Amino acid sequence: GNRALRKQRHLAHTGGACPRAKTIKLMDLVHNCVSIVRHNAGFSVQFLREMHAMLAVMQDASDPAAWVFAQRMYARACTRLESRRLQTALR
């Protein structure tokens, strides 16, 4: 059905998860982020928007370093995507 509604429900569900589950989800997001930005620039914009929202509800993950790492990877992915857009625009 409606992607926005599904993501909103998933966000609420994840926000209520235990800290250990949030840490696992963080690493899943990082893995997906790297793959999606590398292989699907078109979908990357949507994915990164959704990842940003997910990071906001997972600050209390059981491993704070995982959250910091995920934030860093998110920023790196945004930079990489913007760089690709600029390269494409210059061609």
Image (tube, rainbow, N blue to C red):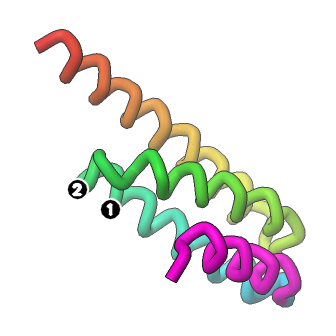
| Residue 15 within the segment the image draws in magenta | yes
User: Relative to residue 32, is residue 68 drawn left or right?
Assistant: right
Name the residue that disc number 1 marks: 35
Q: Amino acid at mark 2?
A: His
Identified at 71% across, 72% down, the residue is 8
The percent position of residue 81, horizontal first and vertical second, equals 38, 36
Instruction: Please tell me which residue is depicted at 28% across the width and 29% down the height of the picture.
Output: 84
For label 2, the crowd category at 10 Å Cα-Cα, with few meaning under 14, some 14 to 19 and many 20 or more, is few
Residue, x 80% and y 57% (percent of image)? 56
Query: What is the number of the mark on residue 39?
Result: 2
- Which part of the image, by quadrant, shows the C terminus? top left
Magenta span main SS: helix
State the extent of the magenta-drawn residues as a range: 1-17
Q: Position of residue 31 (x, y in %)?
A: 44, 68
**Does the segment drawn in magenta span residue 14?**
yes
Indicate left or right for 76 with 66 as reference: left
Give the amino acid at mark 1: Ser
Rendered image: mark on residue 81: none
Which image quadrant is residue 83 in? Answer: top left
Residue at the farthest left position: 91
Q: Are marks 2 and 1 in contact (CB under 8 Å)?
A: yes
* 87 versus 16 height, above or below: above
Q: Secondary structure at mark 1?
A: helix
Q: Is residue 74 left or right of residue 71?
A: left
Is 78 left, or right, of 66 in this rendering? left
Q: Position of residue 30 (x, y in %)?
A: 51, 63
Q: Is residue 37 above or below residue 55?
A: above
How far apart marks 2 and 1 lie (CA) works out to 6 Å
